[in-house]
Image (spheres, rainbow, N blue to C red):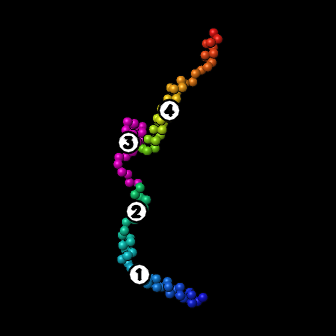
Amino acid sequence: MATSLAAMAVRRATTFTRFPFSSSTTQAASIGQRRGLAGAADHHGPPKVNCWQDPMSPAKWKEEHFVIVSLSGWGLLFYGGYKLFTGGKKNKEETLVQAAQ
């Protein structure tokens, strides 16, 4: 057991002597630029605005606003088409009253 511990200590000592750490390598590492997640905040292009601030130019809108407005528009289009082609809701009570008179 003692010999295996001594052998392990010798192996560790040789690995430390193979890769000496000098002050120049630690200086170079500290000079290098470290970039974390700070680069994600850089915006490219014109700033995005709310859809009610510039309603005539959808290219400047924020992505969330563009999605909401376009989905609402498609919903209104489909609902309007449905009402147009189905004739809307007809009140059957009025037709029965008119036929009885």
For label 3, the residue is: 59
The residue at which mark 2 appears reads as: 35
Q: Given this view, does label 2 or label 4 mark the residue nearer the observer?
A: 4
Few, some or many residues within 10 Å of mark 4 (<14, 14–19, 20+): few
Whether the residues at callouts 2 and 3 have beta carbons within 8 Å, the answer is no
Q: Nearer the viewer, residue 97 or 60?
A: 97
Using the numbered discs, state the Cα–Cα distance from disc 2 to disc 4 in whole angstroms.
49 Å
79 left or right, relative to 60:
right
Q: Which residue bears the numbered disc 1?
A: 20
Upstream in sequence: badge 2 or badge 3: 2
Q: Which residue is mark 4?
A: 78
The earlier-in-sequence mark between 4 and 3 is 3
Give the farthest residue toward the front. 85
**Residue at figure coordinates x 57%, y 87% from the top left:** 4
Q: Are marks 1 and 2 in contact (CB under 8 Å)?
A: no
Task: Please give the range of residues in magenta.
Answer: 41-61
Secondary structure of the residue carrying tag 4 is helix
Q: CA distance from mark 4 to mark 3?
A: 24 Å
